[in-house]
Amino acid sequence: MAVFGGARGLAQAFLRSAAEAKIGVNEAIRQLRAAGLATYRRTDMLADYRQFLGIPEKADKIKYTRLDYRISPDNYTNVMGYQRSKYRYQVNIDTHNPTTDKTFTMKTNVASETQLTRRQIEEAGLDAVKKTVDDYKDDIVKYGVVAAFHQEGEAWD
């Protein structure tokens, strides 16, 4: 169960990055302690790390969800603590700048009080970065939902 906010939220952001980079949990905790961010029990840190390891597996299932279907509740990560809305989705947008020949990944979050279809999530994510993409004259290479979060204790739609 993810808890975002405060010192634990900072530690969880690092643990999520470590899980994505496949850094071992012991090394990640050692780095957190060195940075002074290991502010909660090791047992809880291990649980958070395991949860974050599961996000890429869920993302793989999400990308095969039909565009006109909502994401299955099994593919959501439950979040305890503060979350602005009942549902939150992370969308990655890969862009290519033809001038510099560099590729960049933009990450944006889409918040909603109701479950959205994959198409609605991706369109909202694209709308959020459209101005930046246009300003830099980038080309959108690909985009997709990579994570879905649900507020723990809230009823499902």
Image: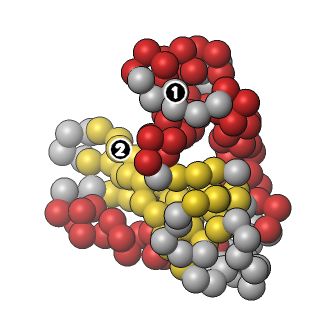
Left or right side of 154 for 81: left
Label 2 packing within 10 angstroms: few (<14), some (14-19), many (20+): some
Left or right side of 130 for 66: right
Label 1 packing within 10 angstroms: few (<14), some (14-19), many (20+): many
| Marks 1 and 2, how far apart at CA | 31 Å
* Residue situated in front as seen by the camera: 102 or 155: 155
Give x and y (percent) for residue 90.
53, 59
What residue is pinned by disc 1? 38
* Residue situated in front as seen by the camera: 98 or 5: 5
What residue is pinned by disc 2? 104
The answer to whether residue 53 shows anywhere in this view is no
Kindly state the secondary structure of the residue where label 1 is placed.
loop
Kindly state the secondary structure of the residue where label 2 is placed.
strand
Q: Residue at x 27, y 61 (%)?
A: 133
The answer to whether residue 85 shows anywhere in this view is yes
13 versus 144 height, above or below: above
86 versus 19 height, above or below: below
**Please, which colouring scheme is shown?**
secondary structure
Q: Quadrant of residue 42?
A: top right
Give x and y (percent) for residue 60.
72, 50
Left or right side of 99 for 117: right
* Residue situated in front as seen by the camera: 154 or 77: 154
Give x and y (percent) for residue 117.
66, 79
112 versus 144 height, above or below: below
Count of picture labels: 2
Q: Residue at x 60, y 75 (%)?
A: 86
